[in-house]
Amino acid sequence: MNAKEWFTLFLRLVGVLGIIFIVRHVLEMTPTWTSPMYLLILKWVIGVVMGLYLIRGAPLVVKFAFPDKSGTAP
């Protein structure tokens, strides 16, 4: 495996762990929250979307970290 594949694997692992963390947080709902419920739901939705993007391999992040070596200027 080259560095690009290791980086993609790391991003996918972070995405899976992020989804697991969010699901655990949702399942451990306690009534002692100080912030409004809509903010918590928004935070969960954003976290799930980011986690799913990372699980897909985050193509834009990988392309930024490992640009094509075509030799031409963008």
Image (cartoon, grey):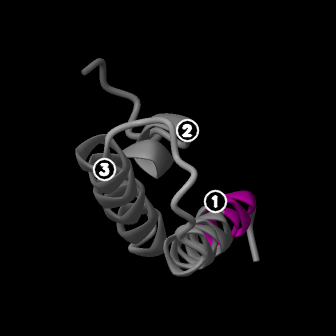
Label 3–label 1 contact, CB within 8 A: no
Q: Which mark is residue 39?
A: none
Mark 3 / mark 1, whichever is N-terminal? 1
Residue lying at 54% horizontally and 43% vertically, measured from the top left: 66
Residue where numbered disc 2 is placed? 65
Residue 41 drawn at (x, y percent): 30, 56
Residue lying at 29% horizontally and 59% vertically, measured from the top left: 45
Mark 1 / mark 2, whichever is N-terminal? 1
Label 1–label 2 contact, CB within 8 A: yes
Residue lying at 57% horizontally and 65% vertically, measured from the top left: 30
42 or 69, nearer to the observer: 42
72 or 30, nearer to the observer: 30
* Horizontal relation, residue 11 to residue 19: left or right: right
Task: Write down the region rendered in magenta.
Answer: 3-10
Residue where numbered disc 3 is placed? 37
Q: Which mark is residue 4?
A: 1
Mark 2 / mark 3, whichever is N-terminal? 3
Kindly state the secondary structure of the residue where label 3 is placed.
helix
Q: Is residue 12 magenta?
A: no
23 or 74, nearer to the observer: 23
How far separated are the C-alphas under marks 3 and 1? Answer: 40 Å
Instruction: Inspect the image, locate mark 3, and give the three-letter code of the amino acid beneath it.
Output: Met
